[in-house]
Amino acid sequence: MLWFCFNLEQNIGYNTVRLQSCYPRFLFWGVCYNSKSQRKREVLKLSTRKNRIIIVSVLIAIAIGIGVLIGSLAGYLSLRSAPKTVSESMSSTLPSDWNLSQVSSEEKESSTIAISSVPPVSSNPASSNKPPVSSSASSSKGTSSHPLTDLSKLYPDLYVQPKEIIEHQKGDKVAYLTFDDGPSVLTPKVLDILKQNDIKATFFVVGRSDPQSKNIMKDIVDQGHTIAMHTYTHDYEKIYASPTAFLDDMSKVSDLIEEATGVKPELLRFAGGSVNSYNKAIARQLANDLTRRGYTYYDWNVSAGDAERGATKQSIYQDTINQTVQFEKAVILFHDSGKKHDTVEELPKIIQELKSKGYRFDKLDSSVKPIQFKLPAQ
Ligand SMILES: [Zn+2]
């Protein structure tokens, strides 16, 4: 403002405008306020038409400047108060082998989301809640994406019968190795290591429908491991756009697994975990609906960190061991992709170390009480 005041004086001169001892005065809308005389006003008196034009121009410039300033301030404040966009919030966790739309954020959630004590699913939710199958049910498959959609009328084939929960016995040290994002070219190596150690594990697979991937899925099942769903596309923005979008994606990966292996999957792991930056708004509704359908979803309480940037063989080994020993029942998250050579290389050592610490290894099934993240408030 003082700058404008100064320029005004320079432009129109003292002879024509009464701007005596303008400092420290503040010019606003053609009025000069004298701070010394406590709000005493001096209206600028202009003697020529030219000077009036100059004054008006300067005032317009000031008004525009103020407008821009206010606009910028408002924009800044709205950006600060708005929630982070999904891209911003997740970009720091992008593993090297996923696109932005396919990022795996498990490792981030593993360190930030509290594990809840999960009540066992009801013993028979599937049969008691299965909706009447009608022509409208099948025809409505995947059509609506409104969050308030009555999910009970959708996807009549997405129902399974869970087993009774078997409570974990105190003193029983058990490690559940789980591999997300496969099948991959490295899955056969993982299967070989598991076979050599005579242990079973769980594979949460995505929608790879090429013949080789389907053969690997079959190998997983034939070798006695659990095959489970990890969504078809692993595309956060797509699958978490609405509950029906998720169910639509899930039905595809369920169909693919069943086609490849002859086994209908009963377990799933949400891409990014059950609660993540993309699905907070629908996480509870999804969790409730999947449980109602008889599905069991598993998060994890140990992360190998092998999807994190900067992960090394050493960090994968140490993170896995250091976290696992804190639990008698450890659900350990690994990733299975063509780039996870370090995971595969460290796996035998991890298995040996955990064996030496008294752990047994098992695969997940619905009788294993799930480790699940705490759902957001409704
Ligand atoms: Zn994943």
Image (cartoon, grey):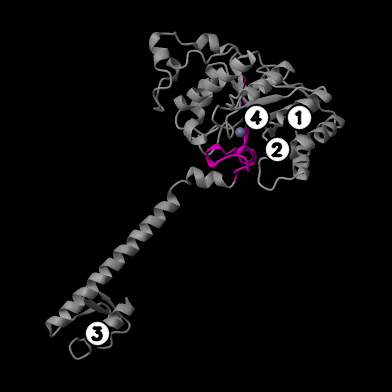
Mark 2–mark 1 distance (CA, rounded to whole Å): 11 Å
Estimate the x, y position of residue 275 in percent, counting from the top left.
Answer: 55, 34
Residue at mark 4 to residue at mark 1: CA–CA distance: 12 Å
Q: Which is more foreground, mark 1 or mark 3? A: 1
Tag 2 or tag 3, which sits nearer the N-term?
A: 3
| Chain-order first, disc 3 or disc 4 | 3
Query: Helix or strand or loop: what does disc 4 sit on?
Result: strand
Residue shown at 15% from the left, 83% from the top: 46
Residue identified by numbered label 4? 182
Q: Amino acid at mark 2?
A: Lys
Q: Specify few, some or many for label 2: CA neighbours under 10 Å numbering under 14, 14-19, or 20 or more.
A: some
Based on the displayed image, in which of its 4 quarters is residue 318 positioned? top right
Task: Give the mark nearer the N terminus: 4 vs 1.
Answer: 4
Residue 48 x, y percent position in the rendering: 12, 84
Nearest to N terminus: mark 1 or mark 3: 3
**Residue at the front extreme of this rendering:** 211
Report if residue 105 lies within the magenta region: yes
Label 1 and label 3: CA atoms lie apart by 81 Å
